Image (tube, rainbow, N blue to C red):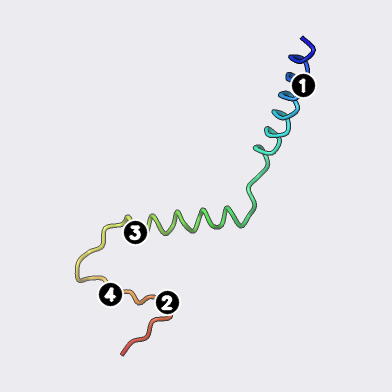
Amino acid sequence: MAQLSFLDRITKTLRAHFDATASEPLPRRWIDLITYLNDVDAAQAKPTEPETEQPRRRPGSRTH
């Protein structure tokens, strides 16, 4: 019985610690990254109209 009580205390302590950690807000940089990735996904999901859109150059690429 003493062992069960000890395990209950450990469980309670760990649960409280992880619950507190899980409820902390995400860092701003993570939110910015998630937003950026969502925007990229949304842009890629849009159907493009053939021959009305100019080809896009990749950043840093040179034209001849």
Q: Position of residue 34 (x, y in %)?
A: 52, 53
Residue 19's place in the image compared with 25, above or below, is above
Mark 1 or mark 4: which comes first in sequence?
A: 1
Mark 2 or mark 1: which comes first in sequence?
A: 1
Crowd band around label 3 with a 10 angstrom C-alpha radius: few (<14), some (14–19), many (20+) = few
Q: Mark 2 points at which residue?
A: 59
Q: Distance between the residues labelled 2 and 1?
A: 56 Å
Q: Distance between the residues labelled 1 and 3?
A: 50 Å
| Mark 3: secondary structure | helix
Q: Mark 4 points at which residue?
A: 54
Residue 11 found in image quarter: top right
Q: Mark 3 points at which residue?
A: 44
Select label 1 or label 4 by which is in front. Answer: 1
- Give 9 or 24, whichever is nearer the viewer: 9
Select label 4 or label 3 by which is in front. Answer: 3
Q: Distance between the residues labelled 4 and 3?
A: 15 Å
Q: Distance between the residues labelled 2 and 3?
A: 17 Å
| Mark 2: secondary structure | loop
